[in-house]
Image (cartoon, grey):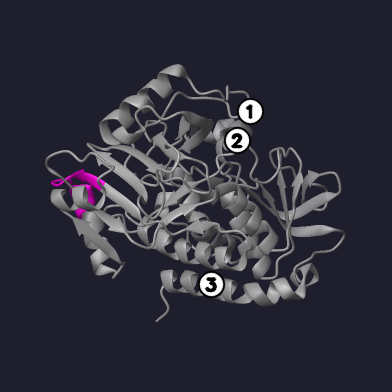
Amino acid sequence: MVTRRGALTGMAGAGLAQAGAASAAGPQARRRGAGTAGICDVAVIGAGVFGVWTAWHLAKRGAAVAIVDAYGAGHARASSGGESRVIRLSYGADPIYSPMARDSLTAWAQLSARGREPILHRTGVLWFSPATDDYMAKSVDWLTINKVQHTRFDLAGLRAAYPQVVFRDGESGFLEAQSGALIAGRGVRAVLADAGLEARVLKASPPERDAGGAYAVGPGLRANALIYACGPWLPKLFPQVLGGRITPTRQEVYHFGAQPGDTRFAPPALPVWADFNGGELVYGMPDLEGQGFKLAFDPHGPVVDPDTQSRQVTASGVERARAYLARRFPGLADAPLIHARVCQYENSSNGDFLLDRLPGHDRVWLVGAGSGHGFKHGPAVGLRVAAHVLEPKTPIEPRFSLATKATRAERSVY
């Protein structure tokens, strides 16, 4: 018997296996799905991580795909832009996100291996929390049951392995050995290149059918189906449907520089890390590719407009980051802030993604609500969306449906 999960996983394997042959054959090999009168099969609106991986899966299965973005692929305002993102498998006992992350890790690793520059850095991901934390215990159970390589640490073990970090009494942790960090903007562009696609700079509008029943996307561009993967711009395009259901929030990211010759805060001495205490997550990266030690606070910031929000970090945010360094990474307490970035999450009410049709349109899909943890899942999300488009009877995961997106924030996914 072939299960739904088995079918989706099989599709992913087939798509990855075709990658080398398709790339060697060139773009003409991927035009088998081209329609008549210059109409492409699918137009993807948004060249962030969900959009590019959806386009990748569609192209590998022979669809004629166009992809557009108002600012270009991996641009500075995008939730998928910038330098680095965590890729980790631990999601407590969540039955959806850990398997999706595991499948996505494989896809990212294969893409990284095909490129000239690395996309995936397997630094490992170190989690630490109070030893009694239920979320962490369930994460370790999942890793154990699924035979994912990891190492558990009691307090003494943490202090011995990572003396540059201050661990509190009563804490424990574990290391996901094969996880790590993704280089975000580079990764988005690499996915497009691997699919033989280029993102066209175009500001899209809500869907309108022309006289022939196709959707007009822009000058000279029409499509039989549309996928809106616009991240924080989704509620701006569809305010009546998504207003209050997807909320962009301002998130600040800081990069601090260690002293010359100090390698304690770079791989292999330090992995990607996540401090999970009382449901509040603080996370960061070791110094990757000379970008400095990265620190970010996961709790949602103020609601913003992704087009117009200020991209300058606040003095209060930097002060908060320095106070955290003094407590946890005292060797960086006086480190210079070498650069910082303001981006945004696009949050659903509970942290679940949105993968569903636009009401009233059988061939228009809404894909988003990455909610701060979405980047790593790009390959698995793209696979699901491609299945929906090419096999319309594929059932929608209830947790990803529009109907489950409320307007009251009750976050349950970390």
Q: Residue at x 40, y 50 (%)?
A: 399
Find the magenta span and give its range: 128-137
Residue 31 appears in the picture as rendered: no
Query: Front-most of 82 and 258?
Result: 258
336 relative position to 147: left or right: right
Question: Relative to 304, is 134 above or below?
Answer: below
Residue 106 appears in the picture as rendered: yes
Q: Residue flagged by tag 3: what amino acid is it?
A: Met
Q: Residues within 10 Å of mark 2 (few under 14, many from 20)?
A: many
Which is in the foreground here, disc 3 or disc 1? 1
Q: Residue flagged by tag 1: what amino acid is it?
A: Asp
Question: Most extreme residue toward the top, as rendered?
Answer: 315
Marks 2,1: beta carbons within 8 A:
yes
Q: Residue at x 56, y 51 (%)?
A: 50
* Residue 92 image position (x, y, % from top left): 27, 52
Task: Quarter of the image for the N terminus: give it.
Answer: bottom left
Question: Relative to 365, is 152 above or below?
Answer: below
| Residue 233, disc | 2
Reply yes or no: does residue 132 show up in magenta: yes
* Residue 280 image position (x, y, % from top left): 29, 35
Q: Secondary structure at mark 1?
A: loop
Query: Front-most of 144 and 387?
Result: 144
Q: CA distance from mark 2 to mark 1?
A: 8 Å
Q: Residue flagged by tag 2: what amino acid is it?
A: Trp
Q: CA distance from mark 3 to mark 1?
A: 36 Å
Question: Relative to 147, is 373 above or below?
Answer: above
| Residue 11, disc | 3
| Residue 307, disc | 1
Q: CA distance from mark 3 to mark 2?
A: 29 Å
Q: Secondary structure at mark 3?
A: helix
